[in-house]
Every structure is written in structure tokens, then in C-alpha cells.
Image (tube, rainbow, N blue to C red):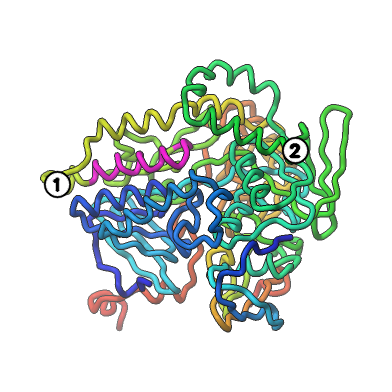
Amino acid sequence: MFKRLAEVGAPVAITVDGKAVSAQTGDTVAAALLLAGIDHCRTTPVTGAPRAPYCLMGVCFDCLVTVDGVGSRQGCLVPVREGMTIETQLGKREAGR
Amino acid sequence: MTKASDLAPSYDLAVIGGGPAGLAAASLAARAGLSTVLFDENPGVGGQIYRAITSTPVTDRTILGEDYWAGAELAAEAKASGASIVTGATVWSLDPQRIVGVSIGGKARMIAARRVIIATGSQERPFPVPGWTLPGVMTAGGAQTMLKAQGLLPAGRTVIAGTGPLLWLLAAQILRAGGKIEAIVDTTPRGNWLRALLHLPDFVLSPYFAKGLKLMREVRARAPVVRADRIEAVGKDRLSEVVFGQGDDERRIAADLLLLHQGVVPNVNLAIAAGARHAWNERQLCFQPVLDVDFGSSVPGIAVAGDGAGIAGGTAAAERGRIAAIAAVRALKPEATVPDPQIVRQRLQREEMGRAFLDWLNRPADRFRQPEGDTLVCRCEEVTAQQVRDMAAMGCEGPNQMKAFLRCGMGPCQGRLCGLTVTELIAVQRDTTPAEVGYYRLRPPVKPITLAELASLPISETERKAVER
């Protein structure tokens, strides 16, 4: 869906649901996920529908993911950091955790 | 990086939001000698218009354009002004006594401010069309944010749809960067021209006129532009095609990415939660704070500057920030030298010229603000337009009662993407006005925070003793 215009940042290694993903300094979690081609970053708590980052400016909360064990972080506001572990949030099943 | 523990317990001025209004306000106040702190929740300053202005990887200046790069000066001035600029700082609470609740890196603090300037800007107006929650559908502003901040360009089949200046700007930026656009679906109602033309003389004299024409010519030469009065995102689990049309004519375009936009509206959550009175703006179809000439709100000591005060654009936002800051300096340090507010007001007036034309021309059609049937209104709690309409028809009079019935506005976005739609649907269903219906009652925390963040608040000995047995 997206491609990078220029490789100017330093590489940052993160994992998404256990898989290695390569990001760059300056990426937010949401941008890194979109660039990695993930099809959704969470499912909704009501119907379990898939959602992906929508507004990228902290408004919509559709990019909620678990970052280093902390749930419901806004992926568009969190910069990637070396070794960061990101997990997609499956709304219905994981609502109680 | 400033940590929560680095913050002072109190400041003369707290500015919330680091876009043009916030940067200009903090800069002016700090130079005049006020102890000033500026909080922004993003990794860097600039707000949305000057997003990532200090760090963008897009170095070819022609891609984002000179209007974007003008933000570099504001950011540099603010940095040199002596104001404490704290990024990655989420303000989740502001009360009428001007106590600011803020979280930085998972640690919360409550700080006191003698004056507060809310500069939380605007957000994109909700665009509730069928399929707008599908992965592959995003806002135009969102795509622009990633272009500015990360240098990401839409790849694959991209459709841009809606109305408003940002739509054309984004299209031009994508094309200049070497991207491709399958179609631009223009949903501007033709009938808007009648009302807009009344304001044409003002618009022709404004800087928007020449810029706007040039931009539209640039885009039309390189991407197909199609008019439509309806649009739908279609796909199972993700977007596969965009269906749009006008009258009996219907077209389908296979697409990987649909970017929606129909203007911007003030980001009202913090100001409403702080108790500032708001009123309906019929021209801009949104709620905005009721303000005095210095952008002071109904809550003493709290001002709202920038697009949060009503949409007027980035350059106007900076002037508004300056006016609010001058008022703060005059109240707290009358002996300090400040710029002549009359000159700033004149510049502001110039920047606001042409706005009426743009507002009337780009006024979204009723059907794109008042959806029907299964179209989701509340993305978080997945409440449909029909549910809201039915409940209003059954006697539900306002958005707050609607929450109790349907849970709309009660998810993590706290009504940001359904508030205006719910208000308008109730108004239309009950044959009254949005002003009568009102908006969601918003309370702190205006951003979700964890219990651990709350628990990290410093506790004094007296407070500890008060609960110890």
C-alpha cells in the first residue's frame, strides 16, 4: 500500500506478532506496520471486524496495538525503538487481558 | 528528551499542542519572559500542517511545497525562545483551575499554569460512507502525515475522494513525489457554487486564489478527476474496489487504497472537557469555542488558539497564537515588551480572507454528513446510522442520552469520529438544529491513560497520611 521514498533513517529491528520487521528511525509503529504490509492491526471488540490505521494523527484509535506488553497504545504516536515487540490486538478474544 | 520528572510543578503559561498556533504562542510568551511549557503528543513539533518539520526525510522541497517549509522558521523560533518544548507528552486533563494532567513516557504529572493556551488544532471531519472502516481506507490527512513524517508514498492503486483544499494539495504532493493516482473523485456539490460566489471578491484578493487554481491545474493535468454524489468502499476484510456515481451513472474502480477527506473541524475534546462553552458554526458545520477578541474562552485564564478556535488555516493559526500569547503576557507581566497586537490582528484578518468562499464551496453534501442505513456512524462501538436515526425518532433528544442507548461515542476515540454525525442525525430526525441538539458531554481523561500512569503521580506526605490507617 505504501513505499518509502528514500532510505535515510537508520534501520530499527522490531517484531510484529513474533515476526521480524525492519523499520527505520523516524517511523511510528503505525507507519512501520503499514509499510510492512500488514492487513490489519486489530479487530474490533464488538464484531471482530479487522481495522488498520486510519487517521495517523491520534484521533481515530484504529491503530491500537500492544507495544512491549502494554495494550491499546496508539501506534501512530509511538516511535519505533530497537527491539520493540508489537502485537496486533484481537478485540473480542483478548478483551479481558 | 524531557521526562515527566523534569517538569516544574508550575508555569506561567502552558501551551497544549505544537502546531503553528502553539509554536507561535510559546515563542512569543517565552521571549517576553513568561516561564512557558509546550506539550505535544507527537514525536516532534509542527502539528499536522508542519508535521515532522524538523525531521522529515522528504528533502526535495518541491514535493511538499514552500507553504510546508514555512513551518521550519516557527519551529526554530520556538526552540530558540527558551520555552520548554516537550514532545511525546499527552495532555489528558485540564480543569478550570488550570491544572494540566500530562503523561510522558508512561509517567504522569499534574502541573499548574497561570494561563493555558489550548492549541490542539483540527481533525478531519468524519466521512461516514459505506465501508469507511475497511483496512485500505484512510484519511487523506493520514496519508499526508506519513508522506511528511516518514516519506511514505501510496503505492498500488490509489483513489482520492471528497472535497476541500487538502484533497488537491495531497494529490499534487503524491504526483510530485512520483506517485500515481487512479482517480480523484470530487464530491463537491455543484450547488455550492451559488452560495460561494457571493464571497468570490474576497477570495480573489486572498493568497488562496492563485495557489488554489495552480494546484488544481497541476493535478488535473496528471490525474483523472471524476464528479460523484455518492461513494462506497467495497471489500471483504479489506478494500477491493471503490464504487461511486452520479445520478444513474455508476462506476467501479479496483483499488488498494482509498483516501477520504471532506474538510477539517476543530478538535474540541480538551476545550469542552475543561469547561469552555462551545457554539455551533453553521457555515463550517461544527462546534467551536465561544471566544473573546484575545481568543480567551469562557473559562478564565484558558484561551483556544489556532484551528481549534474555528477553521482558518495554518498561517492564521500562528497569528491567533500570538494574539492569545500577548494577552497572557499582558495579564501576567504587563511590563514586558510584546508586539503591537493591532498589527498582528491586521495580519490575521488578511490570513482569514477568502475563508468564507472556501467554506461554502467545500461544504460537504448532506448525505456525506447524515448517512443512512447500515453505514457505521460510531467506528469504535460499531453503531449504524439507522440505529441512531431510529433512537432519535423514538424520542432520544440528545447525544448524551444516545450514549446510554447505543454506546455511540463511548469507545476509545471518545466521540471524535462520530460526535458531529450523531448530533446532525438527531437534529435532522427530530427536525431541529445541531445548535439545539448540542454535543457529547466530554470529561477528562480526554485521552486514555493506564492505571500505572495514574499511580505514577507523585504523592505528598499529607496525601499519603490521609488514606493510611
Question: Percent x, y for residue B278?
Answer: 43, 38
SS at circle 2: strand
Q: What amino acid type should be assigned to the residue bearing mark 1?
A: Ala
Residue in the picture at 46% in, 36% down: B312
- Find residue A43 and report its horizontal and vertical position in percent: 72, 66
Q: Nearer the viewer, residue B105 or B420?
A: B105
Residue of label 1: B336
The reply, left or right, for residue B102 in relation to residue B36 is right
Q: In this view of the protein, can residue A63 be seen by the observer?
A: yes
Circles 1 and 2 on the same subunit = yes
* Direction from residue A21 to residue B451 in the image, left or right: left
Question: In front here: B65 or B135?
Answer: B65
Which residue sits at x=46%, y=56%?
A: B53
The majority secondary structure of the magenta stretch comes to helix
Q: Kindly identify the amino acid type of the residue bearing the numbered disc 2.
A: Val
Q: How many marks?
A: 2
Percent position of residue B172, x then y: 64, 43
Is B62 drawn above or below residue A29 in the view shown? above
Which image quarter: residue B222?
A: top right
Between B372 and A8, the one nearer to me in the picture: A8
| Location of residue B76 in the rendering, given as x and y in whole percent from the top left corner | 35, 56
In the picture of the structure, the residue carrying the numbered disc 2 is B185
Which chain does tag 2 point to? B
Q: Quadrant of the N terminus of chain B?
A: bottom left
Start-end of magenta stretch: B310-328
Real-space Cα separation, disc 1 to disc 2, in angstroms: 52 Å
Q: Is B458 drawn above or below residue A60 in the view shown?
A: below
Mark 1 / mark 2, whichever is N-terminal: 2
